[in-house]
C-alpha cells in the first residue's frame, strides 16, 4: 500500500470512529434523558397514589377520632376501650400503604413530613391515661393540629405533581 491509498483510508477509518463515538455519546445522552423521564413519571404516579393513600389514612383516623369522642362524651376511658376491629384494621392498612409509598418519594423532606403526619394520626388515636376531660381536650388538640398539617402536606404533594408534570410536558 502506498501513501496515496493509505491517507484516504486512514481518514475514512478515523472519520468512521469519530462518527461512531458521536453516536455512542448521543445515544447515552438520549438514554439518560429517557431514564430521567421515566423517574419523573414514577414520581408522579407515586405522589398521586400517595395522596389517595393519605386521604384514606385521614378518613380512617377521622372515623376513629369520632369513635373516641363518643367514648369520651359518654364518660368512658380510651385506655380501657378497644377500637372496633374493622376500624383498627382499616387504619393499620392505611398506615402500611402510606409507608410503602413514602419510601419511593425522592424528596427527603417530603418523606420526613409524611412520616411526621403518620405519627400525628397515630398519636391522635392512641389511648391516654388522663381523666376523660383531659383526654377530650387532648384529642381535640391533636385533631386541631392534624388537619392544618394534612392540608399543607396535601398542597405540597399537589405542587410536586404539577412541577413534575410540567417537566414531563417539557414546559418547565
Image (cartoon, grey):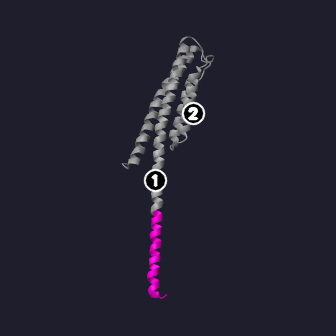
**Predominant SS along the magenta part:** helix
| SS at badge 1 | helix
Question: As drawn, is 15 to the left or to the right of 135?
Answer: left
Residue 53, placed above or below residue 66: below
Percent of width and height locating residue 14: 47, 76
Magenta segment range? 1-25
Residue 127, placed above or below residue 105: above
| SS at badge 2 | helix
User: Is residue 157 inside the magenta stretch?
Assistant: no
Question: As drawn, is 93 to the left or to the right of 55?
Answer: right
Q: Earlier in the sequence, mark 1 or mark 2?
A: 1
Tell me the number on the disc at residue 96. 2
Residue pushed farthest top? 74
Percent of width and height locating residue 171: 36, 48
Please say if the residues under marks 1 and 2 sit with CB atoms less than 8 Å apart. no
Question: As drawn, is 36 to the left or to the right of 166?
Answer: right
Separation of disc 1 and disc 2 at Cα? 31 Å
The residue that disc 1 covers is 34
Q: Could you tell me which residue is drawn at 56 percent across and 18 percent down?
A: 135
Given residues 131 and 5, the one toward you in this image is: 5
Amino acid at each position: 500500500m502506498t501513501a496515496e491509498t493509505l491517507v484516504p483510508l486512514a481518514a475514512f477509518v478515523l472519520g468512521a470512529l469519530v462518527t461512531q463515538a458521536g453516536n455512542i455519546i448521543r445515544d447515552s445522552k438520549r438514554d439518560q434523558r429517557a431514564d430521567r423521564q421515566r423517574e419523573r413519571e414514577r414520581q408522579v404516579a407515586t405522589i398521586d397514589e400517595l395522596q389517595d393513600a393519605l386521604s384514606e389514612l385521614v378518613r380512617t383516623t377521622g372515623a376513629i377520632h369520632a369513635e373516641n369522642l363518643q367514648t369520651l362524651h359518654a364518660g368512658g376511658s380510651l385506655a380501657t376501650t378497644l377500637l372496633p376491629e374493622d376500624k383498627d384494621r382499616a387504619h393499620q392498612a392505611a398506615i402500611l400503604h402510606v409507608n410503602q409509598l413514602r419510601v419511593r418519594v425522592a424528596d427527603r423532606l417530603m418523606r420526613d413530613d409524611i412520616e411526621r403526619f403518620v405519627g400525628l394520626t397515630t398519636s391522635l388515636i392512641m389511648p391516654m391515661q388522663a381523666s376523660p376531660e383531659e383526654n377530650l381536650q387532648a384529642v381535640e388538640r391533636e385533631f386541631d393540629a392534624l388537619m392544618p398539617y394534612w392540608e399543607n402536606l396535601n398542597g405540597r404533594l399537589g405542587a410536586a405533581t404539577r412541577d413534575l408534570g410540567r417537566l414531563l410536558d417539557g414546559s418547565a
